[in-house]
Amino acid sequence: MRKNIILVLALCFLLSPVAFAYKNAGENSPPFELPNLITSAGQSADVQMASVLAKRAGLNATLKKTATAEDLENIKTLTLVFGASLKGLGAAGIDVDQEKERVRELVSEAKKRDIPLLCLHLGGEARRGQLTDQLITEFLPFAQMAIIVKSGNHDGFFSKICEENNISLVEVEKTVDVLTPLKDAFK
Amino acid sequence: MKEKIKKHHLIALCLLCLTGTLCWLTGVQFLSMRKTDTFYPSPGLSAQTKLSDYFPQLADSPGDTAVYCFRGEEEGGNLLILGGTHPNEPAGFITAVLLLENITVSRGKIFIIPQANLSGFTHDDPFEGNPQKFSLETPGGRRWFRFGSRLTNPTHQWPDPTLFTNAAGQALSGAEVRNLNRSYPGKEKGHLTEQIAFGIMELIKKEEIDLSLDLHEAAPEYPVVNAIVFHENSAELAAIASMELQMEDIDIRMEASPPSLRGLSHREWGDHTPSMAILLETANASHGRLKGKPSEALIVEGKDPNYVKASKLGMLFVPYSKDGIPIKERVARHLAAVNALVSGLRELNPDQAIDIGNFPPAQTVNEQGIGLYLHPPK
């Protein structure tokens, strides 16, 4: 009996690193799965760059600039690209309020379906502004992760929201540098 | 009494001579704008044709302009580069000249039209006070180029209507009837400017152009500047190119072509042909409303204290220091963008790859000047 107990304890001791390793692997594993739906929040052309980056990263992604809740069928990750452009909104034939409402419904539906949200801000400081900031303030808190071009966080705007909402924030120097963290974010 | 009459005759004769001399001098100056610019195509040139080869109605008209064709031995993509749509935006025109005087093509085809609106080069805008010409120093001497008007010469197309209704039925101000970049897709039996636009559309269709580029400049206070304006059919290509340019530390903004903005190249080329359509803009102070005295130096060196002040006040959409934005920098920017777009085209569609030799390197042009890559004057 004593021998058995010692054997079990020894086994537990030996296997514990393996168990911990599995646990850590779970913690560090990429949070996002494919297929991925990429959409804009603000209709800037930056969403197009996100699509190219996803393609270069070999990710199965669908780009739909004005995606709605219906587009979430069979989707496992929603990627929101922040960047407001009045020209872009005009080109899409919608106004600011309609865009906000569209994103609101989309994010809400994603939450209902347990689809995680990945947020990107690729335009740096030049793509900040009142309208973009409003969109970030409203929708970034729902994200699991944000990947941004560093200059867009010159005033700590993203850091503050991410800290308050326990969101993983990755900063890169240039848009093209988003490729690696984006690739790493997916299983 | 008799003497007095004699004196009057003499004064009248003098005034007549003076008026005649002034008319002759200004006439000579006015007509000097009709003297054509000379280009020196690279040995890689396959053929020099005319726009009228694609639309015969333009033959012998002031709108018939030269088309330089570079054909590679291998099949590949077909590229059209347009400079001089607006002859008062010289970086686009000079970029096209620089390319046609240097490049060779081993794969694919490149068509270059350096003076898309040739009529616009034959006059300038009277109230702008712009110089008629500007020069660039080459190792073999100074070369002069015309600095024309945004619009077709009114002696070639007159009168302007009160309102110009474009092909899409949108009403624009009357003078826009002479703006090539409001006249697409053009009209076979329209005004001269519409016929030029029609001819360019015919070229794009007949040569099965895969990518069409329209090189422009804009005022630093204009929001669409240092930008790639793209038709939705070329959005992915524009994104690839803008990222490549960022890697070269060239900031460029992406601007989608609004579907409602009709008559422009980046809209109508993409809507009416299978070609990917892109317009490029650089920042030119001589083009702006805030500029001081117009001069050749302003065109070439791009320095203007008014714009330095405007920059400090946050009124501009590009950085602007006392060093200005010289034409060599603007041309370098266009060259880098053309290169990035060609490389993006290869990434997107390997069948449409275009191999270009002797492409003037943007960085060298920016650092050492345009003249290094211009043929010396004969």
Image: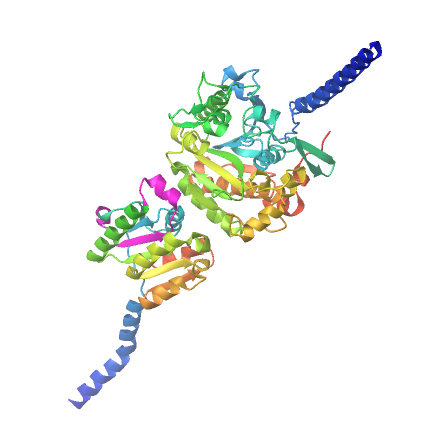
Task: Report the span colored magenta.
Answer: A70-95
Residue at the outermost bottom position: A2
Q: State the image coordinates of residue A170 (x, y, percent, origin top left).
A: 39, 62
Give the camera-side residue of B104 and B243. B243
Rendered-image quadrant of the N terminus of chain A: bottom left
Write down the quadrant of residue A77 in the picture. Answer: bottom left
Q: State the image coordinates of residue B7 (x, y, percent, origin top left).
A: 82, 14
Residue B6 in view here: yes
Give the camera-side residue of B238 and B104. B238
Residue at the outermost front position: B1
Q: Is residue B130 left or right of residue B9?
A: left
Q: Is residue A7 left or right of residue B332?
A: left
- State how the image is colored: rainbow
Rendered-image quadrant of the C terminus of chain A: bottom left
Residue ID at (30%, 61%): A141
Vertical relation: B187 (above or below) A113:
above
